Amino acid sequence: MNDDILELLESNSRLSPDKISTMLDIPQEKVEKVIKVLEEENVIVKYCTLIDWDKTERDIVYALIDVKVTPERGVGFDAVAKRIYKFSEVSSVFLMSGGYDLSVKIEGRSMREVALFVAEKLATIEHVQSTATHFILKTYKKDGIIFKKDKKLDERLVVSP
Amino acid sequence: MNWEQIISPRIQDVPPSGIRKFFDMVSGVDDVISLGVGEPDFVTPWHINEASIYSLEQGSTMYTSNYGLLSLREEIAKFLYSKHELTYNPENEVLVTVGVSEALDLALRALLSEGDELLLPEPCYVSYEPSTVLAGGKVVRVKTSAQDNFKLRADDLKKAITDRSKVLVLCYPNNPTGATMDREDLLEISQIVEENDLIVLSDEIYGQLTYEGEYVSFASLPGMRKRTIVFNGFSKAYAMTGWRIGYAAAPKPIINAMMKIHQYTMLCAPIMSQKAALEALVNGDRERKKMFKAYNQRRRVIVQGLNDMGLDCFEPKGAFYAFPSIKKTGLSSEEFAQRLLEEAGVVVIPGNVFGESGEGFIRCSYASSLENITEALARMKSFVKKLV
Ligand SMILES: Cc1ncc(COP(=O)(O)O)c(C=O)c1O
């Protein structure tokens, strides 16, 4: 049941408990209680909106940085990750398997700003061995949603048997 | 030209489609939200499209066996076995057709002689009657009612039987009502079928869209396999209406007779659609279940919304239609639908187009996004408020 509620909220965080209650056939009070607990436990971390910034005037540059870390006794990946994610320029950090260790997503107003941040702040952190910066040129799909030019029109006949 | 002399009287006798009439009315009205659509609002899951595209790239552009690709028939047989423990020989007891539509037409033409009677529980899907007339049969309608949750009652069926009765059509979950029949309900019907030596056309196209209770294939009831043609397809459960692909499973002599027509009129179903259907059966469950879940959620929203605005709506347990009563408003189904369109911009289908016993009801499809359903319900609510 928790999963069903989470799935619905993940696809549309504006769904009211009343609507969720109907959709899942669970009493509203129960839905409210479950959501409250999930919020308290930080399972529901935040309610946000998916925005296609490319369609706006605002210029934002995103980059994915592959970060290699030299692990040292007593300093795990978590500690290094923590030093990285504290920067407000960093929008996400993942621990990765494979060729590098941390994948860091950075947001800036220009390529220069991002590059400088990587050179000055990220690369200089202790235990960071190397970085490779990849700028994101275009978003096609994000969090399961395809970013298209327009909303797709319903091509179905208005009436059919 | 004297067209009346040119067009065959049999075709002239087919009444114009009530849905068509309504369609013409709707065209030209702007900013409508449609709950009038009888097909999924989802597009076909991409892996299915992709499989078909790949097959085209591989050069699969030929005719197939008249029966359809053997690999597809084998998967269909497997599906029928795993779902209902029904055994059909994929070699000669499964026929792949251009939608369930074609399969129904084939069956009716294969079975009916001039004057044979076909028992048709109504309200029902709009094609059965004209197809029966075209095949030379005669339709005997059996009414069902909201009080019985639109189930076919054994007593009503018995009363409609004559010595010309030959075929019974069952469509559960039902279009337009969303009604389902439980095993017990069907068992009662199967006794009458046995006693009166009927052949059953079981249109199970909405079978996999059964939200409550069990989806029982009529052929799986004791003694019924030999007198049942099972129809199923991909249009609804896999959101594949445009592919035009479906199938029939039945005892060999019946499939053989249907094949006789199919091989000359259709030759075979399009190979790219057959490849797509194969992919749907083999790998389509995950996406199918996602769509199923979404329909089920919307079903609860629409049923509650309709009841809340005072339109009594029995709980549809399958398909993607709600069938509320609008009798309280004092309007006929057609008046209601027309005024709802003109005054509130919402399209629903007047229940009477599905048969007389649909009068006083409207069909609201919930194969539409939650946002659309919510907006449509809000518009309907203020419309109904003005009336009652
Ligand atoms: C009850 C019923 N049977 C058959 C069909 C036709 O299905 P197909 O697309 O497989 O021809 C429909 C489509 O609306 C239907 O509602």
Image: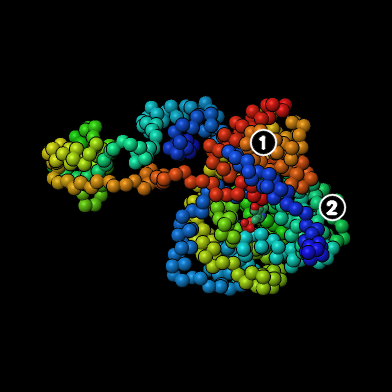
Find residue A113 and report its horizontal and vertical position in percent.
19, 38
Q: Nearer the viewer, mark 2 or mark 1?
A: 1
Task: Kindly indicate whether the residue at mark 1 contacts the one at mark 2 (C-beta within 8 angstroms).
Answer: no
Who's the residue at 54% across and 65% down the image? B274
Query: What is the number of callouts on the image?
Result: 2
Is the residue marked by circle 2 packed among few (<14), some (14-19), or many (20+) residues within 10 Å? some
Q: Which mark is residue A74?
A: none
User: Looking at the image, which residue is at 69% across and 57% down?
Assistant: B202
Relative depth, front residue between B108 and A147: A147
What is the C-alpha distance between the residues marked 2 and 1? 39 Å
Q: Position of residue B88 (x, y in %)?
A: 63, 66
Q: Position of residue B210 (x, y in %)?
A: 61, 47
Q: How is the image coloured?
A: rainbow
Residues marked 2 and 1, same chain: yes
* Type of amino acid under label 1: Glu
At a point 60% along the width and 58% down the height, the residue shown is B233
Query: In the depicted view, which residue is nearer to us: A48 or B197?
Result: A48
Residue B31 at least partly seen: yes
Crowdedness near tag 1: few (<14), some (14–19) or many (≥20) residues, C-alpha within 10 Å: some
Quarter of the image where the C terminus of chain B is located: top right
Determine whether B8 is above or below B17 in the image.
below
**What amino acid is labelled 2 in the image?**
Ala
Ligand 1 located in image quadrant: bottom right
Q: Residue furthest right?
A: B163
Residue on which disc 1 sits: B342
Task: Provide the residue designation for mark 2.
Answer: B160
- Among all residues in the image, which is located at the extreme front? B1
In percent of the image, x 36 and y 32: which residue is there? A45
